[in-house]
Image (cartoon, rainbow, N blue to C red):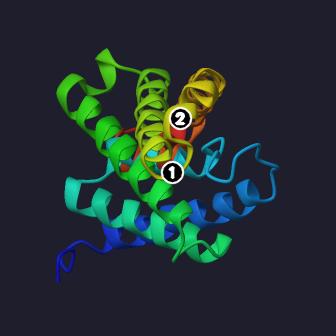
Amino acid sequence: MLLSGNENIRKNIALLGAFCLFLSAIEYMIPKPLPFMRIGIANLPIMLACNVFPFSAFFILVCIKVIGQALITGTLFSYIFLFSLAGTFLSSFTMYLLRFLFGKDKITFIGIGTAGAFISNISQLALAQFLIFKVNTQYIAPPFLAVGIITGIALGIFCEAFAEKSRWYKEQLGITNVESL
């Protein structure tokens, strides 16, 4: 088994995976102007996992999020699943790569959240142009990208605040003296 040796990582995958699914259900209830447009709150656990997990565990969490979200929304066998798959995988791996290359001291959650949202939106716009809207994608691109940037920044701010205050998160990073926080 890929993660058979580390019980803590498996528990954290389950915990963050459950948060992804919970947030996906919440996000599903928020009205959307386009079927594939989401604000991305289900990516919060993915953003936090960038610092906590090795790549193999991170990949498993991303798969849980994509498949679980499709099951919750009933879109597993639809074109919307393709949008979610492309957006989530490309944005998640961009965020993980940025954290790996620059570290948490050089790029904040705001930076990786914004980059992740931008990459997700670009991939979804490319699919929309190819599959649905053709040349008319140019009309939805500006507001779609603007909303993505705004939500990426907002999610990054939330992650920064959570990482600063969370005892659990600091324990996962191996920060000592969490009792005094």
- Quarter-wise, where is residue 39 in the image? top right
Left or right placement of residue 25 versus residue 168 in this view: right
* Front in this rendered view, residue 91 or 138: 138
* Front in this rendered view, residue 149 or 165: 149
Residue 138 position (above or below residue 64): above
Q: CA distance from mark 1 to mark 2?
A: 25 Å
Q: Residues within 10 Å of mark 2 (few under 14, many from 20)?
A: few
* Front in this rendered view, residue 98 or 130: 130
Residue at 55% from the left image edge and 25% from the top image edge = 138
Q: Name, please, the residue furthest toward the front.
A: 135
Residue 160 position (above or below residue 176): above
Q: Residues within 10 Å of mark 1 (few under 14, many from 20)?
A: many
Q: Which residue is mark 1?
A: 45
Marks 1 and 2, the one that precedes in the sequence: 1
Q: Which residue is mark 2?
A: 180
Residue 120 shows in this picture: yes
Q: Name, please, the residue furthest toward the bottom.
A: 1
Residue 174 shows in this picture: no
Residue at 42% from the left image edge and 58% from the top image edge = 85
Q: Secondary structure at mark 1?
A: helix
- Quarter-wise, where is residue 72 in the image? bottom right
Residue at 53% from the left image edge and 48% from the top image edge = 43
Residue at 33% from the left image edge and 41% from the top image edge = 51
Q: Residue 154 at x, y = what percent?
A: 64, 27
Left or right placement of residue 45 versus residue 162 in this view: left
Q: Secondary structure at mark 2?
A: helix
